[in-house]
Image (cartoon, grey):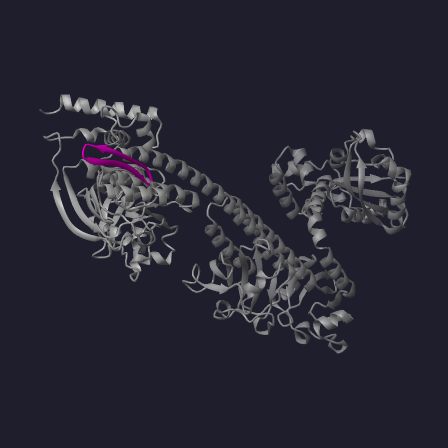
Amino acid sequence: MVPPELTDTLRETVGAFDDRVEPLSTSEVASRLDLGRRSTYERLERLADRGVVRTKKVGASARVWWRDPEDVSGVSTAESARDDPGRSVQFEKFVEAVSEYAIFALAPDGRVQSWNEGAERIKGYEAGDIVGRHFETFYTDEDVAEGVPERNLRAATRLGSIEDEGWRVRADGTRFWANVTITAIRDDDGTLTGFTKVTRDMTERRAYERRLEDHAELVERQRDELERELDAVFDRVSDGVYGLDDEDRLTYVNDRAKAILDVDEEDIGEPLVVVTETSQQFESALETARATQEPVVDEERHSTTEVWYEYTIYPSESGLSVYTRDVTARKRKERRLRKRVEQQNVVATIARRALEMHDVDDLLDGVTTLVAETLDTEYCKVLDLDDDGEALRLRQGVGWDDGLVGEATVSATEDDSQAAYTLRTDQPVVVEDLCEETRFSGPALLTDHDVAGGISVVIGPANDPWGVFGVHDTERRSVDETDTNFVRTVATILASAIDRDQRERQLVDQRERLEALNGLNEVVRELTDAVIDQSTRQEIERTVVERLAAAESYEFAWVGTADFDSKTVSMRAEAGVEGYLDDNTISIDPADERSRGPTGRAFRTGEIQVTRNARDDERYDPWRGTAEAYDFRASAAIPIAHEDTVYGVLNVYTDRQNAFTAEERAVVAQLGEVIGHSIAATERKQALVSDEVVEIEFHLPDAFAKEDTDVEMNGSARIDHVTQVSEETFQLYGSATPCAVDGLERLIETTSAWTDLTIREAGDSIRFSVRLTEPTILSLIASRGGYVDEAVVEDGDVGLTVQLSPHTDIRAFVDAMTDGYPQIDLLSRTQVTRETPFAGDGEQPLDSLTDQQRSSVEAAYFRGFFEWPRLASGEDVADSLDIAPSTFHQHLRKAESKLIEAALTGPR
């Protein structure tokens, strides 16, 4: 009967039961009402509160609802029991056995008697198709053949209820994994009247469990050893069991519980809180179990012994039963597993960062922080082994005193260094107590920070290590294999990342070097062509620095010369920078530390000098601020030299890493030679054609003493003209007395430097031409930009008149002459204005000739090519110049054309 005071909605809900006493799930009631599950649940709760329907929780979170038989039929419970005495008992057992939604009844022979919607949904049969058929229909052929259905009924008959899991078959033939509970139903006399069967589709859960099993398989393999150890522990440990009455007094305690609670038989009957220590957490669990009449499972760590216990509290009418066990090993295992998972996640994070890395130091900084947090250590470090293998620098780290990272070093060879010991082994080095360590004593970096223990491992291969990775703590603690493997794995990732970074840097460096070399070669080619077109030393130097500063490989360039009075370097030309030497002093005095830079060294040695890292090179200390202000990393100082003359030093600067390799140095050194040769040629030309020259007279006594011969030069010879054929070959033209001719002939016969002597008489005078090879005083003069205007040989002594461009460093020229010929005397130095055959302003006719054209004209003139009859043929003149006759005639024709044009069109 339905109480009359119910609302229409509640009456509608009661009507969903259709005078049935079988339990319905919330979903089944909602389906019948065509209503949402939540709204249906709220209605059912209200009906349950009023006693109209009854309810019970089944499974983990499900609930079933039913009406009492007397409410449905109007017959009292007593009458029902009288008519069917076993019905109430059977119903209660049926409800207690329910765990899911497919619920149906079986006859004693196993045939289906009832069917609900859950069964239809799970198994796929409609009631009319299945009722009356044997329940073996739901089993696989294999299970039927093995008699599983009948065996389950026999077991349920014998035991009262059984639970089973296995494959079952739907109406469409598909299989699903089922959890099945079969409960035997008996009347008051104990006679079997049938069975209830509850089935739950567990296919998805089983699939999920299988995935979890597959996922855990790898971890399980790794944990096998630990599992075996824990299994052995569990085999030796049994549960502690004790009982409590309603007043929490001990009513029973087994031996294991006595040990756990630290009680004995005499304590039975005493309140638990009196005989042993209990926690607020445990007392709260007791109250919860009593209040809910549901088992309570919890765990906690004993405050004194630090042992973890798990306890399960079962409530009953007489009190509480408590089952407790030592789960310390399990908790440790779980903690190790959690730690391993956390470490694996950290390893994955570090690996990802390594792949995305753009800067090694950023990676190392992040890794040290992450590892220290993961292992809960105070210190973490990355030590970088130097190129000499002598020291390890604290490249990155966390926890160390301010200022140590990037600066502090430890020995890579001394016995007291843990890092040095680590480098000598390919295994992780574990220290649990540094004070008791016998393999090493510990460097100051560790002892100054009160380090007690830690782990260190080599970064990179043992035979070629990059450095050392380590973690340290100030508290002594044991180190397990998990932490050791974690540190080694991180070191392996770092080694791979560093190796990849080094290889990428090498590729970048190679590309940059190749680009720099290509660009530099192009600049050198351009400069070689450009300097030839310049008419003064200043123009050459300015052209060079401007071209270099404009090149992609360099930032700026300048040319300096040595001031011997102040022993400092002064500026001659600069580009890409302004006033570079205004605030910088560079010395050439070896005693001055300001001469230790590349420029000072280049002046002293005459060889190219480089600084590849201006910010780390100790010799660059006086200009450290300059390097930072102008933002350059490397510089090269290239001597501008020709023969033994150093005109100055070319300085170039770049921000490229690893600049000025051997290949690049060779190219820029060649540039210094090109510039030096060009300056020397320009100054020689200026000395030849300039109206204003510096004229210096020397006296060289016993001029032929250096010749490896006993020839005595008697008489006199006058050298009127000198033509330079090559750097060390000169053609001399002049007149001589008969005695001097004899001396010249003996020189030709006895020395290799004097060759190709030609003697001819011209009226009352004797004319001669002779070739002079190998380094001589003439090559020294020419290399310094000088020109021999006149030379007179008198009884073995030589008087020289040398003309130089006013722009030549006269002092350096005289010093060079004195160094080469210590016996030479300087007679006079004057600046003169030469008279030229072509008067007037502007370029003189000879200025327009190239060096080859001028040499061809001079050789032809002084050898008598223009005489009639000719005193020398074109072949003779060409031979004296070491060129082909056709080349000589080509140069001569072009020179004649220029000179005739100048004579005809020049000022009259």
The single residue placed furthest to the bottom in the displayed view is 266
Q: In which quarter of the image is residue 206?
A: top right
Q: In which quarter of the image is the C terminus?
A: top left
Total number of numbered labels?
A: 0
Question: Is residue 721 in view from this perspective?
Answer: no
Q: Quadrant of residue 182?
A: top right
Q: Residue 685, how many percent across, how many down?
A: 22, 37
Question: Is residue 646 in view from this perspective?
Answer: yes
Query: Is 766 inside the magenta-drawn segment?
Result: yes
Judged left or right of residue 173, residue 286 is left
Judged left or right of residue 880, residue 825 is left
Q: Residue 331, how many percent across, how many down?
A: 66, 61
Q: Residue 501, how many percent across, how many down?
A: 50, 46
Query: Is 464 inside the magenta-drawn segment?
Result: no
Judged left or right of residue 63, residue 350 is left
> Residue visible at 26% across and 27% down?
865
| Boundaries of the magenta span | 755-772
Q: Quadrant of the N terminus?
A: top right
Of residue 765 and residue 351, the one placed in the foreground of this image is: 765
Identify whether 197 is placed above or below 846. below
Judged left or right of residue 128, residue 403 is left
Q: Residue 377, how many percent across, how many down?
A: 53, 62
- For the stretch drawn in magenta, the main secondary structure is strand
> Residue visible at 45% across and 63% down?
408
Of residue 493 and residue 256, the one placed in the foreground of this image is: 493
Of residue 315 and residue 861, the one placed in the foreground of this image is: 861
